[in-house]
Image (cartoon, helix red, strand yellow):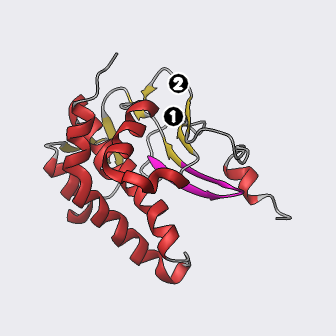
Amino acid sequence: MTDNIFKRLHSLSKPGPQDELPFLIEENPSHDFYFPISAHEALEVLHGVSGSQLGGITHIWMRRDKRSSTPSANLPLAEFICGSGVRVIVLYPWRRDLTLPLGASKPNQKLLRPFESLNAEVFELDHQWFARFTESAIRQYCIQYLLLQMFAYHIDWYNRHWSKANRKQAEDFANQYAVRWGLDAVEILNNIDPT
């Protein structure tokens, strides 16, 4: 592409035919942030719930957030990047104080539903809304609502050509996939030997 859009999203090279996939990349986050799950744990969970559909994922990238450390509800916690011969699940780090900025407006019920299921405390501080989690709740949220949804986008990509017109369908599929496999994925995560 002439505008190098994929170079702006990532600097990853297309894997070779002999490469063992997916590549696991873990960057060091800044001192105020950390990754609640490792790339290895993410891979084990995906192997446990996916069967043979994992084959197209080329990278699981625990990516350092190079943007501002200022709390913002607009920054993604995860992304799925597909292009230039790669299919990447990107997970960004969480704040060490276990809070998630939600913005200046009071969050709606749709946004709060996953937080309530994880017993996260939603509160307002200095005209900003936050959700505060426990360590285990953040790990569960990362698996259930981030990793599985990004993986669902990967699966959906094979079944439907993405366009702006079917964006809602892709999001609905990702949400349904996370609900269907979420508890199984959390059980897999809890059974991974940390050594």
Q: Which mark is residue 102?
A: none
Above or below, 166 relative to 170: below
Q: What residue is shown at x 22% (from left), y 30% (from top)?
A: 191
Q: Which mark is residue 30?
A: 2
Above or below, 164 relative to 41: below
Look at mark 1 in the image and give the residue it sits on. Answer: 69
Nearer to us in this view, 159 or 55: 55
Answer whether residue 80 is magenta in the image: yes
Magenta-drawn segment: 75-88
Residue 68 on image: x %, y %: 56, 37
The quadrant the N terminus occupies is: bottom right
Task: For label 1, count other residues whose C-alpha is less than 10 Å away and answer few (under 14), some (14-19) or many (20+).
Answer: few
Residue 20 on image: x %, y %: 60, 38
CB contact under 8 Å: marks 1 and 2: yes
- What amino acid type should be assigned to the residue bearing mark 1? Ser
Residue 89 on image: x %, y %: 51, 48
Answer whether residue 167 is magenta in the image: no
Q: Residue furthest right?
A: 2
Give the Cα distance between marks 1 and 2: 9 Å
The prevailing secondary structure element of the residues shown in magenta is strand
Does residue 3 show up? yes
Mark 1 or 2, closer to the camera: 2
Q: What residue is shown at x 24% (from left), y 51% (from top)?
A: 182
Residue 52 on image: x %, y %: 42, 54
- What amino acid type should be assigned to the residue bearing mark 2? Ser
The picture quadrant where one finds residue 118 is top left
